[in-house]
Image (cartoon, rainbow, N blue to C red):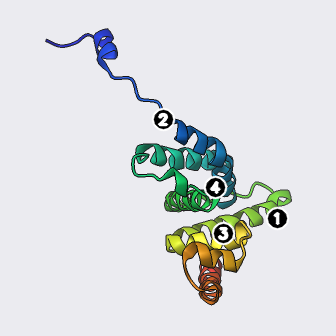
Amino acid sequence: MMATPLQAIHQTPMPTPPPPELEQIFRQYADTVYRTALRVTGRPEEAEDVLQTVFLRLLNQHDRFDATSASPAYFRRAATNASIDILRRRASKAEAPLEENRDHATRENTYLLKESLRRALAKLDPEDASLFVLRYVEGHANKDLAVEFNIEPGTVASRLFRIRQVLQKEVEQ
């Protein structure tokens, strides 16, 4: 016997609320995730998508997440990675704005340069993209990045140099 729509609604289990520690983590780190995503994507609506993605992933994997390991660095990296995923999807759509008049030319050129850089970032290895964003967008020191990525400070500097070269070639194309 088939259930009526009303019966189906009553039979559907209610979603369980998130554990209290996840609510606390959200309140503590939502702003960090949003600001990082906004810097990487350049669009508020995409930053909101990143915020939702990061915390939905956390909610879906809360049984494997150790709340004691939560840190601003963890959430900046998660936001950067989710932002890069969005940039990759955007790049595959190949959207490019049209210049409407000369007054907007400078803004358009700046916009196009930023979009070009974002597309180039999306092509990088996620760890390299994270390293670049954390250094040049978030302003982290090389020594802090060395600790976060578990590499030597000299390696951070050389990787950043290599990443800048790759991005420059990509943007010039």
On screen, 82 above or below 131? above
Confirm whether residue 3 shows in the render.
Answer: yes
Q: Amino acid at mark 3?
A: Leu
Q: Amino acid at mark 1?
A: Thr
Tell me the element at label 3: helix
Above or below, comparing residue 86 to residue 153 in the picture:
above
Q: Residue furthest right?
A: 103
Q: Residue at horizontal 65%, vertical 64%?
A: 115
Quick one: 114 or 142, which is closer to the camera? Answer: 142
| Residue 106 numbered tag | 1
Q: Which residue is mark 3?
A: 134
Quadrant containing the N terminus in the rendered view: top left
Q: Position of residue 159 (x, y in %)?
A: 59, 85
Residue 138 image label: none
Q: Answer above or below: position of 119 versus 50.
A: below
Q: Which residue is mark 4?
A: 37
Identify the residue at horizontal 59%, vertical 45% (top origin).
Answer: 25
* Viewer can see residue 42: no
* Contact flag, marks 2 and 4 (Cβ < 8 Å): no
| Callout 4 amino acid | Ala
Mark 3 vs mark 4, foreground winner is 3
The residue at the point 47 percent across, 30 percent down is 17
- Which mark's residue is nearer the viewer, 1 or 4? 4
Three-letter amino acid code at disc 2? Pro
